[in-house]
Amino acid sequence: MDRLLGKIKILSDQLKSKSLDFGTAHSLISAVINQISELRNEEEFSKLYDQIIEFSGENNIDLNNKMKERRARKTSTRFNNCLITCTIG
């Protein structure tokens, strides 16, 4: 995880610099995009997944928890007796 976020942090810090010009910024952004693209393969994903499993085990995080369902939206009581004939959008 540090390999991915570390690259983005360095780029972020450089982009905040007052002395950065557009050419250098473009080069930095292109380099980070290329480095991240190289990480998009099965081997790197497996390594990242293994790190996540290890981290969750060390910190007692259950990865099998299902996400909570969102509450159902309720129509406002002032619209109970209304009929919608068209919608916007």
Image: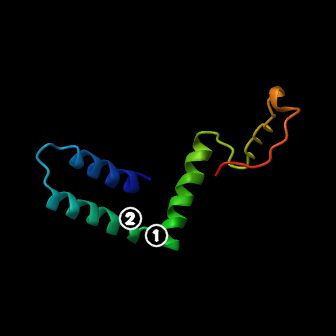
- Expressed as whole percent of the image width and height from the top left, the position of residue 69 reads 77, 42
Residue 40 badge: 1
Is residue 88 placed above or below 50 in the rendered structure? above
Q: Quadrant of residue 39?
A: bottom left
* Other residues around mark 2 within 10 Å, as few (<14) / some (14–19) / many (≥20): some
- Badge 1 vs badge 2, beta-carbon distance below 8 Å: yes
Real-space Cα distance between discs 1 and 2? 7 Å
Q: How is the image coloured?
A: rainbow
Is residue 59 placed above or below 86 in the rendered structure? above
| Residue type at numbered disc 1 | Arg
Residue furthest to the left in view is 19
Residue furthest to the front in view is 85
Q: Residue at x 10, y 46 (%)?
A: 19
Q: Tell me if 46 is positioned left or right of 20 in this view.
A: right
Q: Residue at x 34, y 52 (%)?
A: 8
- Expressed as whole percent of the image width and height from the top left, the position of residue 71 reads 78, 37
Instruction: Name the residue tied to disc 2.
Output: 36
Q: Residue at x 29, y 48 (%)?
A: 12
